[in-house]
């Protein structure tokens, strides 16, 4: 499986090729390189919940299975983003099936140099934003997360999701509008 | 540009996607339009709020665990595909194989004939599966590309079709769902005994294969359920000289009623139709009234007996427009009323609305949590701290989700400490948080806050114990060096245990060389030696400090102490 092209350097290409052939050490190196990124993306969608670790595992298992199909005609991170987003959506769907919509409690390390009052305020704001974000339709939410939280460009998001650029832009606009209106109810303004 | 046009450009403006000319227009407009200027601020604020979610972390041990699980699962799946067949075939194996083959050849016709009664296999990973796509569709919000997207659908997944497109889904080995354009379908359940699909909008034409009793196939819409039930009917052959009448009465399902010449009608549950000789009678009866005639003809005159074909059922569902859940709407209305009261300063009225919602008994757990927390925030904002504390107590002891109780408990601790000035209450709450919510998001803050409270209360040994416990549990995690330094300081200045303090200062230097606390740790370690009269070591430690931090905040102090150490050393 020759991976050709300039989206990845030679070292990375070799590692991916080896991992695709079943080389555990190579896959372990890929895991070490990208685990934080995957964890972060999954947390954006699922928060720090019981199934987050499961979802992270699933992303890497899917990656392992799909490595032979990676031809190098897009960035490896784009490929990985695609898998991570798809797996996250599956878990969201599973969640909705099993229970009412959750109020998402994002579990993050808050900057400890701040005093407790600021922690709590910031934490509360994050909870409200996360809670409101969870009620935004998944189609718009994907774009919001990838653009405003992950800092991906429109073109990258278009690559990741397979959506036309115009659709990405439109979903970003409508997603922000929806979120803004929902948060306005809580804060009076945002 | 008018305000409406500006609003859509404002997003591009904030993201840096504007052309210079449009950017200039936006700039000019917002400088003179208060409304659009506020809109820009709110969008910016929102974007910043989203961008400020910090990065979650894991310890190395946690990553190792995850990696092990991944390799375990990968190895398991690979193991299945590496089954080896024996290289040598013994003669008895040939006889066995032959016997199996003969058995299969003999029994195949029997299986074929009885195929209809075989159990329908569901719940295998092959279903439901997208088998045909004309036009565009999304799967889970992402464009569906048959070459890369999975055609098998999982429970909870959703597909939506573009206008003028059509998708066929194979629900199980004999059932299909034909989804037209502008439709939205989600998979709710897919087990052996229950297939439920949610059609949120559009049209689905569904063909359902025969099912056993109790096996459900349901297409649900926002306001209805379409359930394929079993098929039960009664057939009566009524001899009417000189004619023959067949009466079909359907109690469940739908049956195709066909004449000998092939004309047919579909007869649904609760109705009866008849065929007299070769013709379908035009009269339809409800099952409460069935015409019967007790005359009989000889069997020779039997003709045109009704033939009931397969129990295939057809359901065509056209969803009406979607609408929101009425409970959700009512809830939001009430909350809006409360918010309006808050905006106009009518706190008591807002609290009344919250209390009505809480006592209504009709809220879901999530809504109940939401209302309690709104009430709590309002009470806190209006400095009614005792009442705010009571609200938290209800949540902490109530039937809420663990993460919600965790949050409420932490809030209770903060309230006790900062507003009620009840250190004992705060200590209790932090202790409980640490014990019951060791995975809680605020666990680090709980440990630090508890340590600080112990210090305030001069319970230094407890303070030390808490730091030690915290360091032990969170060793290696970012931010732990603050705890190490605080504990070292405690041993050094308060508990007068310099050897422990030195050990901790050294640990900080070695394990966290980039930490902001290292400079101070070096100096105070030297100080510990000095205090203990370990002159040589003190001298060395001060020298190390000065070499590392020649312009450091303790450099002049260190130089003075070095001189002191030197003199003390000479005088020995």
Image (spheres, coloured by chain):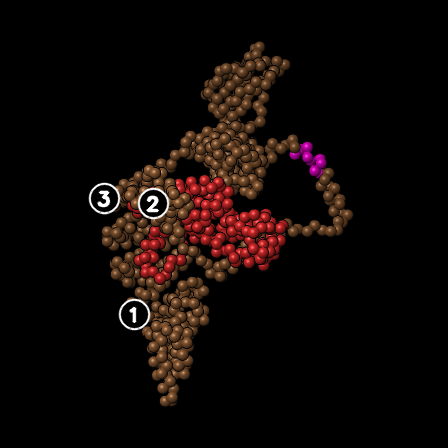
Residue ID for mark 3: B344
Residue B436 percent coordinates (x, y): 38, 58
Chain B palette colour:
brown
Q: Along the line of sight, which residue is nearer the eye, B454 or B532?
A: B532
Residue B458 numbered tag: 1
Q: Is residue A13 shown left or right of residue B86?
A: left
Q: Along the line of sight, which residue is nearer the eye, B270 or B507?
A: B507
- Residue B387 in sight: no
Please tell me how crowded label 1 is: few (under 14), some (14-19), or many (20+) other residues with Cα within 10 Å.
few
What whole-number distance in Å separates the C-alpha atoms at marks 1 and 3?
Answer: 46 Å
Residue B331 percent coordinates (x, y): 32, 40
Residue depicted at 46% across the width and 51% down the height = A41
Residue B110 magenta-highlighted: yes
Q: Please identify, in this view, whether the residue under mark 3 or under mark 2 is nearer the observer.
A: 2
Screen quadrant of the N terminus of chain B? top left
Please tell me how crowded label 2 is: few (under 14), some (14-19), or many (20+) other residues with Cα within 10 Å.
some
Give the magenta-colored segment's residue range. Answer: B103-111
């Amino acid at each position: 499986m020759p991976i050709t092209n300039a989206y990845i350097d030679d070292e990375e290409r070799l590692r991916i090729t080896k991992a695709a052939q079943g080389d555990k050490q190579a896959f372990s190196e890929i895991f070490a390189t990208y685990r934080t990124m995957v964890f972060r993306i999954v947390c954006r969608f699922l928060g720090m919940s019981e199934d987050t670790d499961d979802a992270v595992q699933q992303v890497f298992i899917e990656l392992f299975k799909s490595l032979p199909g990676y031809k190098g005609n897009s960035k490896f991170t784009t490929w990985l983003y695609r898998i991570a987003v798809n797996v996250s959506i599956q878990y969201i769907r599973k969640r909705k099936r099993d229970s009412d919509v959750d109020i998402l409690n994002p579990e993050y390390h808050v900057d400890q140099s701040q005093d407790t009052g600021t922690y709590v305020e910031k934490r509360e704001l994050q909870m409200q934003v996360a809670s409101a974000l969870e009620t935004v339709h998944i189609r718009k939410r994907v774009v919001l997360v990838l653009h405003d939280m992950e800092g991906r460009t429109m073109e990258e998001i278009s690559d990741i999701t397979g959506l036309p650029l115009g659709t990405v832009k439109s979903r970003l606009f409508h997603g922000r509008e929806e979120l803004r209106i929902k948060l306005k109810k809580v804060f009076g303004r945002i | 540009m008018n305000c409406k046009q500006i609003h859509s450009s404002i997003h591009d403006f904030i993201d840096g996607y504007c052309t210079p000319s449009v950017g200039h227009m936006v700039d000019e407009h917002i400088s003179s339009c208060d409304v659009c200027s506020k809109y820009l601020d709110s969008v910016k604020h929102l974007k910043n709020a989203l961008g400020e979610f910090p990065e979650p972390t894991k310890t190395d041990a946690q990553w190792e665990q995850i990696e092990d699980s991944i390799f375990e699962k990968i190895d398991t799946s690979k193991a299945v595909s590496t089954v080896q067949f024996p290289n040598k075939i013994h003669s008895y194996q040939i006889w066995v194989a032959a016997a199996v083959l003969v058995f299969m050849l003999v029994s195949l016709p029997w299986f074929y004939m009885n195929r209809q009664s075989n159990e329908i296999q569901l719940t295998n990973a092959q279903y439901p599966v997208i088998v045909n796509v004309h036009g565009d569709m999304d799967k889970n919000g992402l464009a569906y590309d048959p070459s890369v997207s999975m055609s098998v659908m999982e429970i909870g997944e959703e597909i939506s079709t573009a206008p003028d497109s059509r998708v066929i889904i194979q629900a199980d080995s004999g059932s299909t769902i034909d989804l037209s354009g502008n439709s939205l379908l989600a998979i709710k359940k897919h087990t052996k005994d229950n297939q439920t699909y949610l059609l949120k909008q559009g049209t689905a034409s569904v063909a359902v294969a025969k099912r056993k009793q109790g096996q459900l196939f349901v297409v649900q819409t926002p306001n209805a359920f379409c359930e394929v039930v079993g098929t039960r009917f009664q057939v009566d052959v009524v001899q009417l000289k000189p004619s023959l009448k067949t009466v079909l009465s359907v109690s469940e399902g739908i049956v195709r009623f066909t004449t000998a010449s092939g004309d047919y009608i579909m007869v649904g549950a609760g109705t009866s139709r008849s065929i007299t000789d070769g013709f379908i009678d035009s009269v339809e009866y409800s099952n409460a009234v069935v015409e019967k005639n007790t005359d009989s003809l000889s069997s020779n005159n039997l003709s045109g007996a009704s033939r009931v074909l397969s129990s295939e059922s057809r359901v065509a569902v056209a969803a009406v427009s979607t609408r929101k859940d009425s409970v959700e709407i009512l809830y939001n209305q009430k909350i809006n009323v409360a918010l309006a009261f808050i905006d106009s300063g009518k706190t008591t009225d807002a609290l009344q609305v919250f209390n009505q919602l809480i006592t209504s008994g009709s809220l879901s757990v999530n809504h109940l949590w939401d209302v309690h927390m709104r009430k709590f925030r309002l009470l806190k904002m209006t400095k009614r701290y005792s009442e705010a504390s009571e609200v938290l107590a209800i949540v902490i002891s109530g039937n809420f989700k663990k993460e919600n109780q965790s949050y409420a408990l932490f809030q209770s601790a903060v309230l006790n400490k900062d507003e009620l000035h009840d250190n004992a209450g705060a200590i209790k709450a932090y202790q409980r948080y640490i014990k019951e919510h060791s995975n809680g998001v605020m666990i680090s803050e709980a440990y630090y806050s508890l340590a600080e409270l112990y210090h305030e209360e001069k319970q230094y040994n407890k303070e030390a114990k808490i730091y030690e416990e915290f360091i032990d549990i969170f060793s290696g995690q970012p931010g732990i060096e603050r705890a190490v330094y605080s504990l070292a300081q405690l041993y050094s200045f308060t508990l007068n245990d310099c050897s422990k303090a030195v050990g901790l200062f050294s640990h900080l230097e070695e394990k966290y060389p980039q930490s902001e606390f290292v400079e101070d740790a070096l100096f105070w370690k030297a100080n510990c030696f000095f205090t203990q009269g370990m002159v040589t070591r003190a001298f060395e430690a001060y020298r190390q400090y000065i070499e590392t931090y020649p312009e450091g905040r303790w450099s002049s102090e260190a130089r003075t102490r070095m001189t002191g150490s030197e003199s003390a050393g000479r005088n020995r």
